Image (cartoon, grey):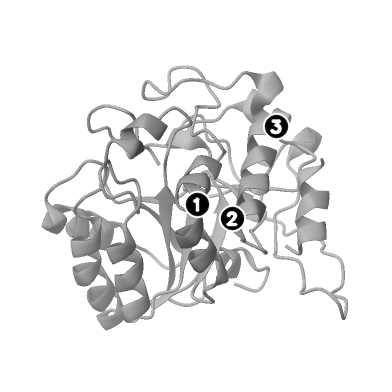
């Protein structure tokens, strides 16, 4: 099914490898188009569709990294809920790919955030996925079904062939619907942040906007919460998108780091928003 059509009918998680700490970088990122797409007018029976960017040259999937020229101090904290398709046995053996305490801290501090979720994660933790998707503080976006890479040589992740990329993204949306997430956002984050022109072409026509980031938290496999907090605080600028993780086994220091990051950014006058609020044409 066309992903855009699925999102409309439904009314409408970055780098976690399977071994070792890695640096977070965006791969092959072209300049992101800035024009917002024209959206259908809302109807009485459905909410207005979320803002997206217009397709790039040749209809390529557009890429959003931050709100360039943001007029006020807004920042989007984004959290990748990563679980690869083949990690079921590890979850069955007791490894935790969720982080309820982190989500609880965001709620307690009243921080809006965007969660980029893999379909496999939603299958493993359907009650948590549904609760996040129904909480007005949060929005759920697509991080692929399998968390397999969309390019070769992406932090050791298995790869998805070009012929299977679109199906992988659509399978994640199906997993969200099955878990009870009624309004997933039409945003997609490439596993590992790795993409190229072939991947952008494979997803063209799906209606999704690819979302990267301009601030790397460095929280993947980090154990020093202070270092994670400093890295975020040093990098944030008005309109920034921060990439973090809500996967307990692979990002154990993130929740503690948040307890420093949030009050300090608020002290500096920042307001926490979802990605959809940064993509707005008037943001």
51 on left or right of 120: right
Position of residue 202 relative to residue 276, above or below, is above
Residue 108 lies left or right of residue 27; in this view the side is: left
Q: Nearer the viewer, residue 64 or 177?
A: 177
- In percent of width and height, residue 166 lies at 70, 32
| Label 1 packing within 10 angstroms: few (<14), some (14-19), many (20+) | many
Label 2 sits on a secondary structure element that is helix
Instruction: State the SS at label 3.
Output: helix
Please name the residue shown 29% across and 72% down the image. 105
Vertical order, 171 against 37 (above or below): above
Q: Earlier in the sequence, mark 3 or mark 2?
A: 3
Q: Is residue 224 left or right of residue 135?
A: left
Residue at the front extreme of this rendering? 92
Instruction: Provide the residue designation for mark 2.
Output: 179
Q: Mark 3 or mark 2: which is in front?
A: 2
| Up/down of 231 relative to 124, above or below | below
**Residue at 56% of width from left, 71% of height from top?**
134
Q: Quadrant of the C terminus?
A: bottom right
Instruction: Provide the secondary structure element on which disc 1 rests.
Output: strand
Residue 210: image quadrant is top right
Q: Quadrant of residue 262?
A: bottom left
Q: Is residue 260 visible?
A: yes
User: How many angstroms separate mark 1 from mark 3 (CA)?
Assistant: 17 Å
Contact (Cβ within 8 Å) of mark 1 with mark 2? no
The residue under label 3 is 167
> Which quarter of the rendering shows the N terminus?
top right
- For the question of whether residue 69 can be seen, the reply is no
Q: Which is more N-terminal, label 2 or label 1? A: 1
| Residue behind mark 1 | 116
Verify CB contact (< 8 Å) between mark 1 and mark 3. Answer: no
């Amino acid at each position: 099914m066309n992903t855009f059509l699925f999102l409309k009918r439904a009314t409408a998680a970055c780098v976690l490898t399977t071994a070792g700490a890695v640096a977070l970088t965006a791969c092959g990122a072209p300049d992101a188009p800035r024009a917002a797409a024209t959206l259908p007018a809302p109807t009485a029976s459905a909410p207005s569709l979320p803002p997206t960017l217009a397709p790039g040259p040749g209809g390529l999937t557009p890429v959003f990294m931050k709100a360039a020229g943001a007029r006020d101090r807004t920042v989007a904290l984004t959290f990748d809920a990563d679980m690869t398709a083949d990690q079921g046995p590890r979850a069955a053996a007791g490894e935790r790919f969720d982080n309820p305490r982190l989500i609880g801290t965001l709620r307690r501090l009243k921080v809006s955030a965007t969660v980029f979720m893999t379909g496999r994660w939603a299958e493993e933790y359907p009650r948590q996925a549904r609760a996040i998707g129904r909480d007005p503080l949060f929005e759920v976006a697509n991080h692929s079904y399998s968390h397999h890479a969309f390019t070769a040589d992406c932090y050791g992740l298995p790869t998805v062939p070009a012929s299977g990329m679109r199906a992988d993204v659509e399978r994640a949306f199906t997993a969200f619907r099955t878990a009870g997430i009624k309004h997933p956002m039409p945003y997609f984050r490439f596993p590992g942040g790795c993409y190229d022109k072939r991947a952008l072409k494979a997803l063209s026509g799906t209606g999704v906007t690819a979302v990267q980031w301009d601030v790397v938290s460095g929280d993947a496999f980090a154990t020093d919460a202070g270092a994670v907090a400093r890295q975020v605080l040093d990098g944030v600028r008005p309109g920034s998108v921060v990439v973090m993780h809500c996967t307990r086994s692979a990002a154990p220091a993130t929740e503690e780091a948040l307890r420093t990051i949030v009050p300090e950014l608020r002290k500096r006058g920042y307001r926490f928003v979802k990605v959809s609020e940064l993509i707005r044409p008037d943001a």
